[in-house]
Image (cartoon, rainbow, N blue to C red):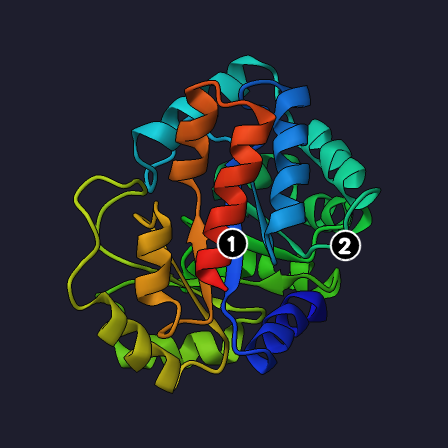
Amino acid sequence: MEQIANAFKRLKEDGKAAFVPFSVAGFPSRERSLEVFLKLAEFGDVLEFGFPFSDPIADGPVIQLAAGEAIRNGLTMDVAFEMISEIRDHSDTPIVFFSYFNPIHKYGAERFAERAHESGVNGVLVVDLPLEESSWLKPATDAAGLAWINLATPTTPGPRIERMNSDGSGFLYYVSRTGVTGADGGLPPDLALKCERLRQVSRFPVAVGFGISTPADARALKEHVDGIVVGSAILSLIQKGCSSDELDQWLDNMAEAVH
């Protein structure tokens, strides 16, 4: 649980924000996605490992496409944990398991938490499991020593943030806007101000995601947040068939902008 918090703490002491890259396991294949995750672990400070779901209501078309292809490729929870174990053989970058609740519920809460811990997961973010329903899973992840990452949005009221301060750990994921993931539509003009306000009331580091796709976006926000999450832009590059060298260069540029 502490690995994620410690990563943010070290970066803050150095005056840096955390680069938190995201990709979907099993897209475009198990082998290629493992290569991508190893790259993300190399350039990122915290890695978001996305598990595919058939109805990803919080995600835009890029991640929807990737999730659908990963499912068709036969990506299962057991295969995902095998991949995480392989990542752990090469990297100690903290890993957040990003998923919708349905696949976890089907797998079994205790079984999921135990396997996640055994494979090397450090935290869990369940995008469609609200605080009021967290008792379905959180006791199991707490027992396994996994950080519980909460989501806040532009419409989250103050009392709910206070509850997240009590019931969360690791960091607080701030959704930059209402709507789904992806770069379309640009970032809200008052995003930096909202991030600053959230940092003032959050017990945990604040990482912002949804719609951040360029180094310019990262540079504009890095002074106002503790971390920057990038996902759709990475998957878009993979969908376009970028080479390993091209992905390296893009990740290096983004990491430099975030830091």
Q: Percent from the top left, x then y, of residue 199?
A: 38, 80
Residue projecting furthest to the top = 72
* In the depicted structure, whether residue 162 falls above or below residue 120: below
Amino acid on which disc 1 is placed:
Ala
Taking the spot 39% from the left edge, 67% from the top edge, the residue there is: 222
Residue 211 spot, x, y in % from top left: 30, 48
State the residue at coordinates (44%, 58%): 257
Determine the residue positioned at 61% across, 32% down: 36
> Most extreme residue toward the bottom, as rendered?
200
The residue labelled by disc 2 is: 92
Please provide percent x and percent y for residue 218: 37, 58
* Residue that appears at 46% across and 71% down: 226
- Which comes sooner in the sequence, label 1 or label 2? 2
Q: Secondary structure at mark 1?
A: helix
Choose mark 1 or mark 2, whichever is in front. 1
Q: Is residue 236 left or right of residue 203?
A: left
Out of 29 and 247, give the one closest to the viewer.
247
- Could you say which is closer to the camera, residue 116 or residue 230? 230
Helix, strand or loop at mark 2: loop
> What residue is disc 1 on?
255
Q: Nearer the viewer, residue 186 or 61?
A: 186
